[in-house]
Image (cartoon, helix red, strand yellow):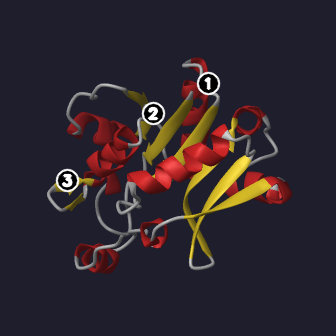
Amino acid sequence: MIYGILLAAGIGQRIGMPKALLTLGGLTFHERGRRAFAAAGIEVVVVANPVVAEALPAPQAREHRVINLQPDEGGMFGSVRQGLAHALVLGATGAILLPVDHPLVASDDIRLLQSELAAGAAMVIAEHGGRRGHPIGLSLALMREATSDPSLSTLRDLRNRHASKAVVAAVSEGALQGVNTKEDLERVSNETFR
């Protein structure tokens, strides 16, 4: 079974609050990500920091939570490792990693990555208009490597190591719409994408 990993442990220093708690269209970024996975029929592991975990409602059906007690230690890759490790315990055969600060990623985008993983891809990279974005899909072998190889310090390290095995998935523009600042939030609030 392929699991979603929603990376929601960042403190959102540049925007002034945890991005998981930002809202767009009346939904928190956490809820938008959770719904995108749910609409694609995928169980999700949410990696949250303690502040986010305290603020969120109780987990929904098919939602698991992992608390990253030290989100600054190890950066986002620390959260990646925690989420992947939890998904492996749950019996995952692959994973789709989505940073919570990409609230416009659609369930169709996730389904496309899921399909590529199910067809045997080792890694699936979302791309729109020739630009790479999020989410990223990993096979079981790469999940295990990411959680066990201490020489890896970022997801980019893993991606570069296996670049020749990567499959590109043409997804919606939401894959490129990361929110790091208030200006980014205003931009995505004023645009809609297919």
Amino acid under disc 3:
Leu
Q: Position of residue 164 (x, y in %)?
A: 85, 59
Badge 3 density bin: few <14, some 14–19, many ≥20, Cα 10 Å: some
- Height in image: 132 above or below 37? below
- Height in image: 153 above or below 169? above
Which residue is identified by label 2? 45
> Mark number for residue 27?
3
Kindly identify the residue that appears in the image at 60 percent across and 53 percent down.
Answer: 136
Q: Nearer the viewer, residue 118 or 81?
A: 118
Q: Describe the element under mark 1 as helix, strand or loop.
A: helix
Q: Quadrant of the C terminus?
A: bottom left
Q: Is residue 75 visible?
A: no
Kindly identify the residue that appears in the image at 32 percent across and 68 percent down.
Answer: 15
- Height in image: 190 above or below 142? below
Q: Nearer the viewer, residue 39 or 135?
A: 39
> Mark number for residue 88?
1
Kindly identify the residue that appears in the image at 64 percent across and 48 percent down.
Answer: 116
Amino acid under disc 1:
Leu
> Is 108 situated left or right of 25 in this image?
right
Q: Is residue 93 visible?
A: yes
Q: Nearer the viewer, residue 174 or 107?
A: 107
- Height in image: 51 above or below 92? below
> Distance from label 1 to label 2 (Cα)?
11 Å
Kindly identify the residue that appears in the image at 41 percent across and 59 percent down.
Answer: 105
> Distance from label 3 to label 1 (Cα)?
29 Å
